């Protein structure tokens, strides 16, 4: 696949490592090795980023991983794997970042569901803005919250005719389950830089599914 030019923006090593470990959990060690080779990230084979919060993992490399998934498994299969890996990455370790937002505190857990979302979603966005070069903002639109990411590591340097940031969607879906104490919510990407939009934006609908 074509090489994606470096962005100059970075994720902490820990976030990249957790995502790679989640990918390995979903597709196996050989599957991850094949994806790393296809993405031009051979140096990461058996050599995952260290488990620290230094901002050293290029957005272009994170995007290349997702592009390689789509190239190897096709758009439908690749995006399904991104979604699963995004969910697994939060479940495996990113909930620790969620805890930094105070959403794990007892006082938070006893709040009504609507109050949990109102406080918890912006708190999660703030944590990502603090620990990475991904600046996240949240706005209330009545029926849903918009969660915007700029710059976006999931699709950096790629082009598409429909939204492709499934890793981010999976992470948000799992994060919402954790925030709400087990409820599921519909998350839909409504703007995507890969399509020519200014930012990548997800709609998080307030009513739980089911």
Image (spheres, rainbow, N blue to C red):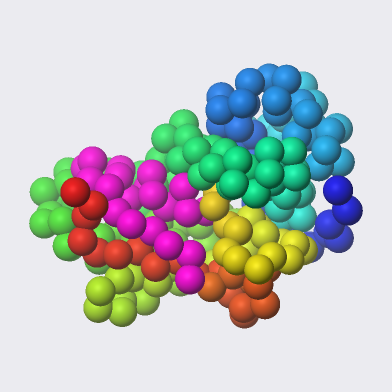
Q: Is residue 116 visible?
A: no
- Between residue 118 and residue 24, name the one nearer to us: 24
- Between residue 113 and residue 192, name the one nearer to us: 192
Magenta segment: does it hold 50? no
Position of 162 with respect to 100 (left or right) is right
Q: Position of residue 205 (x, y in %)?
A: 30, 64
Q: Position of residue 187 (x, y in %)?
A: 39, 58
Q: Position of residue 196 (x, y in %)?
A: 67, 77
Magenta segment: does it hold 185? yes
- Between residue 196 and residue 60, name the one nearer to us: 196
Residue for point 19% across, 49% down: 210
Position of 190 with respect to 103 (left or right) is right
Residue for point 29% across, 54% down: 185
Q: Is residue 83 visible?
A: yes
Q: Relative to 146, is 63 above or below?
A: above
Q: Position of residue 191 (x, y in %)?
A: 53, 73
Q: How many marks?
A: 0
Residue for point 35% across, 63% down: 204
Residue for point 75% across, 62% down: 158
Q: Quadrant of residue 141?
A: bottom left
The region drawn magenta spans 168-190
Position of 28 with respect to 170 (left or right) is right
Q: Quadrant of residue 82?
A: top right
């Amino acid at each position: 696949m074509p090489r994606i030019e470096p962005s100059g923006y970075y994720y902490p090593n820990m976030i990249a490592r957790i995502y790679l470990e989640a990918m390995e959990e979903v597709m196996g060690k050989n599957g991850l090795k094949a994806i790393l080779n296809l993405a031009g990230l051979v140096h990461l084979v058996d050599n995952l980023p260290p488990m620290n919060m230094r901002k050293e993992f290029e957005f272009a490399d994170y995007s290349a991983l997702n592009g390689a998934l789509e190239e190897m498994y096709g758009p439908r299969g690749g995006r399904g794997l991104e979604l699963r890996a995004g969910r697994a990455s939060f479940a495996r370790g990113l909930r620790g970042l969620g805890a930094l937002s105070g959403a794990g505190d007892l006082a938070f857990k006893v709040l009504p569901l609507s109050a949990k979302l109102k406080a918890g979603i912006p708190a999660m966005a703030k944590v990502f803005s603090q620990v990475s070069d991904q600046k996240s903002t949240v706005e209330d639109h009545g029926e849903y919250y918009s969660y915007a990411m700029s710059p976006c590591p999931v699709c950096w340097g790629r082009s598409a005719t429909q939204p492709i940031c499934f890793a981010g969607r999976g992470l948000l879906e799992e994060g919402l389950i954790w925030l709400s104490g087990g409820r599921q919510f519909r998350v839909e990407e409504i703007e995507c830089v890969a399509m020519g939009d200014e930012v990548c934006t997800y709609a998080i609908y307030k009513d739980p599914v089911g």
